[in-house]
Amino acid sequence: METDMSFLSKSSSSSSDDEVGLRRGPWTVEEDSLLVNYISQHGEGRWNMLAHRAGLKRTGKSCRLRWLNYLKPDVKRGNLTPQEQLLILELHSKLGNRWSKIAQYLPGRTDNEIKNYWRTRVQKQAKHLKIDSNSAAFQHIIRCLWIPRLVQKIQGSSAIPSIQTSLLDSQYGPYNITEITQTPQVLSLERNSISSSRCCSSSSPSSESMSTNKSPNIISECPKFPPREMGDSVVNVHFPFDDNSYDMDTFSPATGNFLNNYDQMVGGENNLMNGDILAESFWSMDEF
DNA sequence: AAACGGGACAACCGCTGGAAT
DNA sequence: AATTCCAGCGGTTGTCCCGTT
């Protein structure tokens, strides 16, 4: 019979952790082994008690995190594939920063990993471009530059999972990912037509709308993509903006920056930028 | 070779909702 | 009904690694 119930106390602060001799910081191989062995025998859950009984001088919280994000057998390691990146961008446009929700659609990937990807890769691009990553402008860039680029990369790969195949069959544009809130891991793709009138409209998702699943599909909003020849299987390297709408006055070749307020540039149909230059600036920073 | 800086990722913290008592 | 505790979430910080100077 367990008499020492002190381990059941609520997660303590860092200072009190130290007081009771709880370890913090990186996990050692021995600790990992203790945790894995205990869970293999007794299962997971009741983390505070588990930590105590496994002989770990860690909080239950720490044990849970270590298990879920690192030690659990089905955790996938390694870089996110372009397919996974595409899915994250799409899902984030619909779900916002609900990382655990997004992670449900990427088997083997953790919310922490997705969150880190967003912060280190996606937000980095926003920072480089001096745009708020939650702004409609940046959403537009994701829609019209990043995602097409990912699709291009996927098209160039030999192994294409089913979802990607569907995207490719569609030449990217005519499909929406729908019903994502109901059926994690089973995404349905449905055909819908691209309406050019929706492009660059005020319906671009704002930071507020990003938190709902009612925001417009980011793919179908993108102007001039897929490639101008819809039937052509060759991906057009040009990025999405209408040649007739380029506004060189807004771009400074010397600095690589756009001179005016970016929101204004992409916010209205009369305020489009030079997409090729932006694309070059954008992708030169990319790790693809 | 050493110092420095930035990127990537692991881990922690604070908070919240819900279940259990 | 009130309290306590747990699990989970999202934001933030810490640490390691690697490239550059």
Image (cartoon, coloured by chain):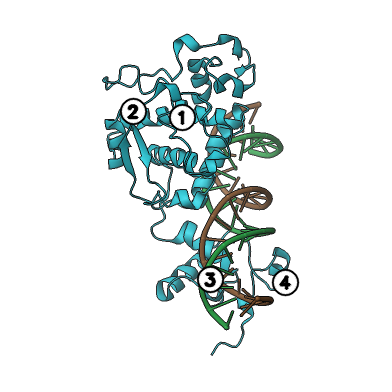
Chain colours: A cyan, B green, C brown
* Upstream in sequence: badge 4 or badge 1: 4
Q: What chain does badge 2 belong to?
A: A
- The tag earlier along the polypeptide, 3 or 1, is 3
- Mark 4 or 1: in front is 1
Q: Which residue is mark 3?
A: A47
Q: Identify residue for label 1.
A: A143
- Marks 2,4: beta carbons within 8 A: no
Type of amino acid under label 4: Glu
Name the residue carrying label 4: A19
Question: Which is nearer the N-term, disc 2 or disc 3?
Answer: 3
Residue A235 badge: none
Q: Position of residue A34 (x, y in %)?
A: 49, 71
Q: Are marks 4 and 1 in contact (CB under 8 Å)?
A: no
Task: Name the amino acid type tagged 3.
Answer: Trp
Q: Is residue A71 above or below residue A1?
A: above
| C-alpha distance separating marks 2 and 3 | 50 Å
Q: Amino acid at mark 1?
A: Arg
Residue designated by label 2? A193
- Residue at image position (65%, 69%) is A22
Category of crowding for the residue at label 3, using alpha-carbon neighbours closer than 10 angstroms: few (below 14), some (14–19), many (at least 20): some
